[in-house]
Image (cartoon, grey):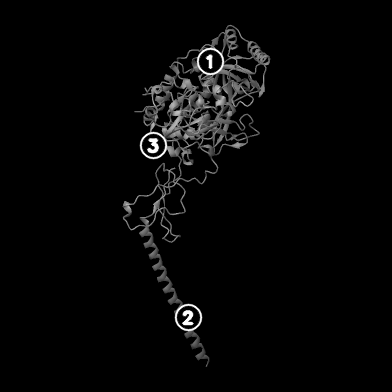
Amino acid sequence: MNNNRWKAVSIISWIVLAIILALGIIFNVSERRENATLKAEVEKYKSLAVVDGGTDGKDGSQSDSKDSKDSKDKDSKDTSTGAKDNKNGGTNGGTNGGTNNGGTNNYAGGGQNTAANQNVVYVEKEVPKYIYVATKPDKSDNPEPTTEPTTEPTTEPTTEDPGEEETPAPKPDTSNAGNLAFAEGVTYEMGSANFWKAKLENPDKVLKTPEEIAAFNQKILEAEDTNMYDLNSIKETFNGNSLKNSLITEVVPSGTIYKNRTQMSGDEKAAYFEAIKANILGAQTTDSDSVKYALVTRRADMKSWPTADFIGYASDDTDEELTLYSLNINSPFVVKLITGDGKYAWGYSNVVTGWVSTDDLAFCKDKDEWNDSWNMTDDNFLVVTMDRLTLEPSYLTPETSALKLMIGTKLKMVPEDQVPEMIGERNRMNNYVVYVPTRDENGNYVKSMALISQNKDMGVHVGYVPLTAGNLLDLAFNCLGDRYGWGGMLESMDCSAYTRAIYSCCGLELPRNTNWQTKTPSNNYVFDVDAAQDAQKKETLDKLLPGALLKFSGHIVMYVGENDGEYYAISAVGSFVTSDHTAKSIQSIALTPLSVRRGSRYGYSTWLTNMTDFIVPYDFE
């Protein structure tokens, strides 16, 4: 009986095992059939998939109540008090730099570090949602970045030959537009340099080589009425007594003025400027004095009178009327006179003369030491290409802690064999090491070192940025939305300082003010804009690349391109008038169509109608 029981158990076990094996075979066949079906579906719809590659001064337009101020054009004022010394000679700062082919950011010709192009392909919704098809990444040296994958399909299935089907243009991504506001005719996607670069046949074409830029700088330096200074050619000795007597004849602001927002009476105003003149006359001078060579150690305002007070024409005036220009860190400055109280120095930058606080200057022991800091003779330097960059704070290196570097600032890199392991308390790892001019307790120049974080490499470039239309757009749009600053006040830029800063990143040194910039010896450009109608101006604009400078009285802009029959420019603008004749205070770097208007004094005519000069610092046909 026991034997029969074990036989029954054995038979049942074999039956269970047979059932399990049979089920496994059935499931395996089913899975293979499903995989084959899915693979067929993918191949069927693959030709219908969509590849998502993506692309990535005041303007003289104040309201009627400010029309009297509208005609005031600081850019047209020649502030170069005193004799101009030896204008002709070698080129000034910024002319000797070459183009860097191994740069750190996405400037064409300077070595691009873009993300790998994934070329992701998304199939139709009728394919099961868990099916994902992607091509191999583009392995080119400088692949273009792709846009983020969309979650919704953009192409409907069709029975037509997919080779004949046109893929619709991708809709612009406005998910980050938030509550941004724009000028009339401007949209969110227009606020990217890539929008305008996509319209160009070859945005990376070099418009001027470093050698051509150097030659062009020399032509600008020698041209009449550009008011540029070859700092290395300024006479080293001069009559200090004669100079200070000349400086006290500087024009005093006319009419009622406000000091630090408080109105001054006529007597108060007279006494105020008499005290300033006395400070100038108190300078220690002789009939034969020598120049001093200095470097700017922090962003420094140049003024027509030596004072730190805010002088305006109204209690709410946004413009400090004595400010002429602002100098970046490491800018060269030739000093001829220091006030009696020792607080202000008068001298030359390469584009304007004026007064600078001595607290913002470091005095070099000789001309060679001075030239070694700012005169870039090779590509071993960094150019700041973002609007502003702040050095990291430090307790151990307070002289460079949290220094602000503005667009166009140029700093030499420390040679590799001279870079220490530590800068203050920090290791050099993942940082550029640069020289920064600082001052000791006596105001003498100290050659300090500082770190610029690698994460800032989209905002700096090794050597000058190659001069291409695409790069000019990138540089200009890096400042979009930044505040406007009359003469450079508030660590900002006015219209002509902005255009100058853009080109300075490429090594091309434009004059300071709008009127002086029109004297630039532009290449291949002979067009009488004054006599031209709008249609003729548009015809000329159609020939120009982005980067051309367009000027009317009191304002200058950078042309960026055409879209749907409208022409656009970017500029540091104080105000403009809308199509319904509403005056708007802007006080920002803004993208605008050339159809925005000027005030009632100009009959509410458009910017385009008012354009008097096109300045084209590159060759075109």
| Chain-order first, disc 3 or disc 1 | 1
Residue 586 visible in the displayed image: no
Residue 207 occupies quadrant:
top left
Query: Residues at badges 2 and 3 in contact (C-beta under 8 Å)?
Result: no
Residue 442 screen position, x and y as percent: 65, 20
Q: In the depicted view, which residue is nearer to us: 139 or 430? A: 139
- Tell me whether circle 3 and circle 1 mark residues in contact (CB < 8 Å): no
Which residue bears the numbered disc 1?
80
**Residue designated by label 3:** 200
Q: Dot 2, how many residues are within 10 Å of its Cα: few (below 14), some (14-19), or many (20+)?
A: few
Mark 2 or mark 1, earlier in chain: 2
In this orientation, does residue 580 appear?
yes
Which quadrant of the figure contains the C terminus? Answer: top left
Lower sequence index among marks 2 and 3 = 2
Amino acid at circle 2:
Val
Under tag 3, what secondary structure? loop
| Alpha carbon distance from label 2 to label 1 | 105 Å
User: Of tags 2 and 1, which is closer to the observer?
Assistant: 1
The reply, left or right, for residue 220 in relation to residue 343 is left
Rounded to the nearest whole Å, what is the CA distance between mark 3 and mark 1?
41 Å
From the viewer's side, name the closer residue of 166 and 326.
166
Q: Would residue 45 appear left or right of 247 to someone viewing this image?
A: left
Residue 191 pos. (x, y %): 48, 38
Q: How many marks are shown on the rendered structure?
A: 3
Residue of label 2: 16
Q: Position of residue 245 (x, y in %)?
A: 59, 9
Which is closer to the viewer, label 2 or label 3? 3
